Amino acid sequence: MNKQTEHILQQFKECIPLMDVLTDENRQAIIMLLAQHKSGLNVNTISEHINLSRPAVSHHLKVLKQSGYIHFEKKGVENYYVLTIRKPLEQLKSLIAAVEAECSRS
């Protein structure tokens, strides 16, 4: 196995958690909802829009936060969740570019 192939395989490993997050329809819905509300939303508002319980929304927000898709901003006593998808998308784009480059050499 050459160094380029090893590097691509490492990128795949690093992107697995990012891709896993996107397989859940509820997390997809939360991402799309936050994309429409740039200033952020709190848990109650998110749960109203996607028809999930507050604990279920909190769980999905935790997963999204751990993977870098979102962060929260404290406003008063509430946490407002904001989409910060840039870093995960850059990792995924880098993987795709590396795979495309490798495949075009074949």
Image (cartoon, rainbow, N blue to C red):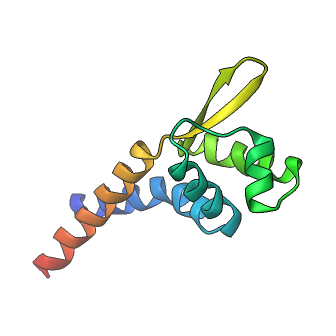
Answer with the quarter of the image where residue 2 lies.
bottom left
Determine the residue located farthest toward the left in the rendered image.
105
Answer with the quarter of the image where residue 31 lies.
bottom right
Q: Residue at x 63, y 47 (%)?
A: 64
- Residue 44 in the figure: left or right of residue 90: right
- Residue 52 in the figure: left or right of residue 73: right
Q: Residue at x 30, y 66 (%)?
A: 96
Vertical placement of residue 25 versus 63, above or below: below
Q: Position of residue 20 (x, y in %)?
A: 60, 63
Q: Quadrant of the C terminus?
A: bottom left
Q: Position of residue 34 (x, y in %)?
A: 57, 49
Q: Residue at x 20, y 78 (%)?
A: 103
Tell which of 67 and 31 is nearer to you. 31
Q: Quadrant of the N terminus?
A: bottom left
Q: Residue at x 74, y 57 (%)?
A: 49
Q: Is residue 1 visible?
A: no
Q: Is residue 86 visible?
A: yes
- Residue 102 in the figure: left or right of residue 93: left
Tell which of 79 and 56 is nearer to you. 79
Q: Position of residue 77 (x, y in %)?
A: 79, 20
Vertical placement of residue 9 versus 69, above or below: below
Tell which of 106 and 23 is nearer to you. 23
